[in-house]
Image: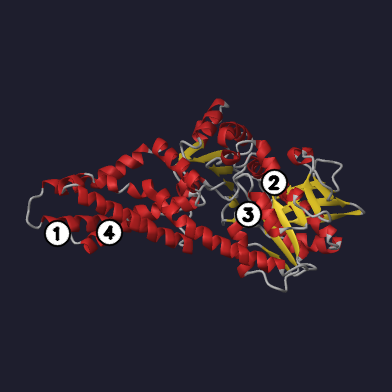
Amino acid sequence: MNLILFYILHAAFLYVPIKESIHMLQQNRYQRERYHAWLKACVHNDHKAFYKRLLSLLPLWTMCFVSHPLYLYLWYLCIGVYAYLYFKADQKKAYIKKLVFTHRAKRLFFVHTLCCISLLYLIYLFVNDSVFILAMPFYYFMPWMILSASALICEPLEQSIKNSYVKDAKHILAQRDDLIKIGITGSYGKTSVKHILHTLLSEEYYTYMTPHSYNNLMGLTISIRTQLNSLHQVMIAEMGADHVGEIDDLACFIKPSIAIITAVGPQHLSTFHTQENILNEKMRLIERLPFHGTAVLNYDNAYIRSYPISHFVKRITYGIHYEDADVRAAHIKYSPKGTSFTLLYPGGEIGLETVLLGEHNVLNILAAVSVALSMKIKPEQIKAAVKRLRYVEHRLQVRNMGSYTLLDDAYNSNPQGACYALDVLASMPNKRFLLTPGFLDLGEKTKEAHIAYAKKMLRCADVILLIGKKQTSDIYDTLCNENYPLNQIHICDTTKEALTLLQQMVSEGDCALIENDLPDAFNH
């Protein structure tokens, strides 16, 4: 068989599985351990997809019995037809989150393709044609199996590139002694607090905030290298972590003088393993503050309140229910148009209004206000800025859909935030719909969280659309046990399917809440 033609045709045949495997690794943050766990779960939970794809490849086996002189060209034709059909099917597939062909993804794609086709050619050299063709349907799954090896080959280059970029970003920060750096971390609420704080501080300072959810080392590095400029007076850096040690690394990298801890809860337990590890990791941001630094702490959160900070820094506490907090909210009122409350702070009080909904958004505002007050932003400026606040996309964002209202909380995936969103849904008039796939990354606490979540739904939602039969089974069972009307529970395979069903059921003036929207890798 001509080597060049072999490579071209089989690369085309394996293009889709190579692309899909890299897509799933990307959704697992390029972490091989997470990818292995995900792959194991897929094999365990989704046998039907495997057998369906295997059956679609069975016609290739018929080539074993062809003895025609043009046999080789018929084989080429079959491989080409399959490659074309898979490519067209992939183009039509509606991904929740598409593969982003970053430079890293492109490098991995090239190496992974080369590894897959080279391994295929080695197999071809050592077996006869019939055996090679007989095993061909199984080769389709090869890219998923050897992806970790391809990623490992790329690792030295990726680490070298990463180190050079980080070194460059550190140099940029080292030149800016005048830059006020603010770090924000927590199990949830980071992005919302970042946006709110940016709005408040922009009243007096030329303020830069890291974009989107660029909250890991490389995300912050890219932000600093490409967007931070010499005119910025304040930098607001969101810091995320799902492993022990990540916040410590980010704190040493950014070296903030002000740190906000928004909340601590059962998030990423599959990688942190214990709640104590999560608490200690988030609080490392405070422990790394300089002695003249300021710690802004959510004292409504029992974990944060109980943590013994080991070195002296200025502390500003905020909360709604903790009465001794330095900055508090009282007389909170919700309506479909937004929220109003009285801000209590050392030295006075002031009434605030915002379009943002939910108790968690009040807490987010209090966190930002605490920093703004410490940086001498006047209460009147804060009031005006809070009134101008707009929704952060997919974080309990209110969308007018014409005939009904949609509460878009698709980005949220934590139990506490979900409960806050359900409280908002419960306050809405007319029929209330909930669309949810449940939670992810809670480890052994997933079942417990899903049971509590289902019980909360009972009084908040009139119709429940569960997304993913396997991942929402505990929610469904709990609803059944609590005698929730079975005709008001619907199980859908995807968010798209749930939204289509919602359109058929919703009426004028109704309200629907989308709570969490899992990436493709985790929708079962």
Q: Which mark sits nearer the N-terminus, 2 or 1?
A: 1
The residues tagged by marks 4 and 2 sit, at their Cα atoms, a distance apart of 49 Å
Query: Is residue 459 in view?
Result: yes
Instruction: Kindly identify the residue that appears in the image at 42 percent across and 58 percent down.
Output: 108
Q: Position of residue 439 (x, y in %)?
A: 56, 40
Where disc 4 sits, the SS reads: helix
Q: Which mark sits nearer the N-terminus, 4 or 3?
A: 4
User: Which residue is disc 2 drawn over?
Assistant: 282
The residue lying furthest to the bottom in this view is 231
User: Which residue is disc 4 drawn over?
Assistant: 84
Query: Is residue 214 in view?
Result: no
The residues tagged by marks 2 and 1 sit, at their Cα atoms, a distance apart of 61 Å
Tell me: residue 432, above or below residue 255. Answer: above
User: Which residue is disc 1 drawn over?
Assistant: 73
Amino acid type at circle 3 is Gln
**Residue 350 occupies which quadrant of the picture?**
bottom right
Tell me: residue 234, above or below residue 430. Answer: below
Q: Which mark sits nearer the N-terminus, 1 or 3?
A: 1
Q: Which mark sits nearer the N-terminus, 3 or 2?
A: 2
Q: Position of residue 516 (x, y in %)?
A: 56, 46
Where disc 2 sits, the SS reads: helix
Q: Which mark sits nearer the N-terminus, 4 or 2?
A: 4
Where disc 1 sits, the SS reads: helix
Give left or right: position of 166 versus 518: right
Give left or right: position of 236 versus 8: right
- In the rendered image, the quadrant that contains the N terminus is bottom left
The residues tagged by marks 3 and 2 sit, at their Cα atoms, a distance apart of 27 Å
Instruction: Kindly identify the residue that appears in the image at 72 percent across and 56 percent down.
Output: 183
Where disc 3 sits, the SS reads: strand
User: Which residue is disc 3 drawn over?
Assistant: 397
Closer to us: 246 or 202 = 246
